[in-house]
Image: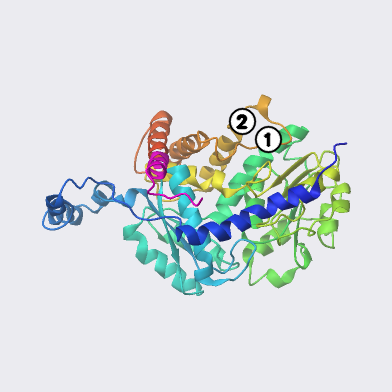
Amino acid sequence: MKTINTKKLLKAAEKPSKDARRLHPFYKGKIEVVPKCRVRDFNDFAIWYSPGVASVCTDIYKNPELVYEYTNKWNTVAVISDGTRVLGLGDIGPEASMPVMEGKALLYKYLGGVDSFPICLGTKDQQEIINTVKILQPSLGGVNLEDISQPKCFPILQTLRKECNIPVWHDDQQGTALVTLAGLINALKVVNKKISKVKIALIGAGAANMCIARLIMYYGANPANMIIADIEGTLHKGRTEFKNVQPEKWSLCVETNPQGILGGIKEAMENADVVIALAAPGPGIIKKEWVKGMAKNAIVFACANPVPEIWPWEALEAGAAVVATGRSDFGNQVNNSLGFPGVFRGTLDARAKTITDNMCITAAQELASCIPDSKIKPNKILPTMDEWQLYPRVAAAVGVKAIKEKVADKKMTYDQFYDQAVKMIKRSRAITSNMMQKGLIKSSK
């Protein structure tokens, strides 16, 4: 067996944090607003602002749908958070969450050609968050809820999806779920197992894993073969403390673990074919001996950020056949960045009013299919962010599905959605590249 240089791997794992502390103050933010119209001379401001703009305002007043044609609403997504559940850091507040939301906006622009802006709210109140999103709708094409703690994240999303006329999704729920499902689809191909037959342990019962549980059940996983463990232990019908206060969690207590297995992470993982962990940052949350106690050819998704529940090399040493994390500096990244840019690209281009569960399933299947079956390997179950064609493919699949779901206002073919996405993504990358070449984005060296 090849010797693993643990010190070297740990040093590499720590490098992104060191670089982040150096580069964030250098650039003083990761996004900015730049014009997209030509300004040939100062006379053009009579077109883009007063007096010319009044005629455009009048047209929109007469036909509000024209706002999508005359303004950037059609391509604008707000990343909205109250900073109560940031990465693995917890409730650190809106100011401290800004670097994360700015990073999300950067990924939207560079990977999906979507103009996105961070909006960190100075409230933790559920109803105030709902009201704020609703009153921001006229300026936005869509909303990405981010890092909002449970249980309030569930009714916030449910209410906004029902009452808003623009697409609203919670990336920690739907985004994480669809990318995890895509990774699971291909990981199961590696070990030649069927989702309807495998035993699945989900470690952590936050917003992400609860949505993952729902989506993989919708896709075909058998809830009778699933065990979920939170910080207090396994979920089962005896966990009645959730019955009246967390209906989403209580329903999983009822539907999964029919054997009523008690205990914690160790017991949930025993003889499991798959473990999907989105719990507290590690390492050491999942122990090597627990991986050894899983079924043959086990699949381990250790996706906590910024540090996985178990280091991937430890899981491999323990006998796992496929190991994935949520980090881009390790192989097999199961990360939302593979999903949300393409999903919103297609959603915005279709002018969809919502993002349905079927659209998420479609996105997961398309993302998984970006790797041909003959190319799927234990260390390659998903494409990486630099394989940029995945984003227009996901966008096109989502756009077509939105039409089939009858939630889209625009009708285009797969090829038309694909071409539009390619155009927008290439434009975003070209802008960044040109600004770097001309020194408008300075080098830190």
**Residue 162 - label:** none
Q: Quadrant of the N terminus?
A: top right
Q: Residue at x 41, y 64 (%)?
A: 133
Q: Position of residue 183 (x, y in %)?
A: 66, 41
- Nearer the observer: mark 2 or 1; the answer is 1
Residue most extreme to the top: 374
Q: Between residue 254 and residue 99, name the one nearer to us.
A: 99
Q: Residues within 10 Å of mark 1 (few under 14, many from 20)?
A: many
Which callout, 2 or 1, points at the residue further toward the start of the chain? Answer: 2
As helix, strand or loop, the secondary structure at mark 1 comes to loop
Q: Is residue 175 magenta?
A: no
Q: Position of residue 80 (x, y in %)?
A: 46, 62
Colour scheme of the rendered structure: rainbow
Residue 145 visible in the current orientation:
no
Q: Residue at x 45, y 61 (%)?
A: 28
**Residue 380 - label:** 1
Q: Residues within 10 Å of mark 2 (few under 14, many from 20)?
A: some
Residue most extreme to the front: 445
Residue at the spot of label 2? 371
Quadrant in the rendering for residue 229? bottom right
Residue bounds of the magenta highlight: 428-445
Q: Residue at x 77, y 34 (%)?
A: 191
Q: Do callouts 2 and 1 mark residues in contact (Cβ within 8 Å)?
A: yes
Q: Position of residue 36 (x, y in %)?
A: 28, 47
Identify the amino acid type marked 2. Answer: Ile
Identify the amino acid type marked 1. Answer: Lys
Q: Residue at x 60, y 45 (%)?
A: 179
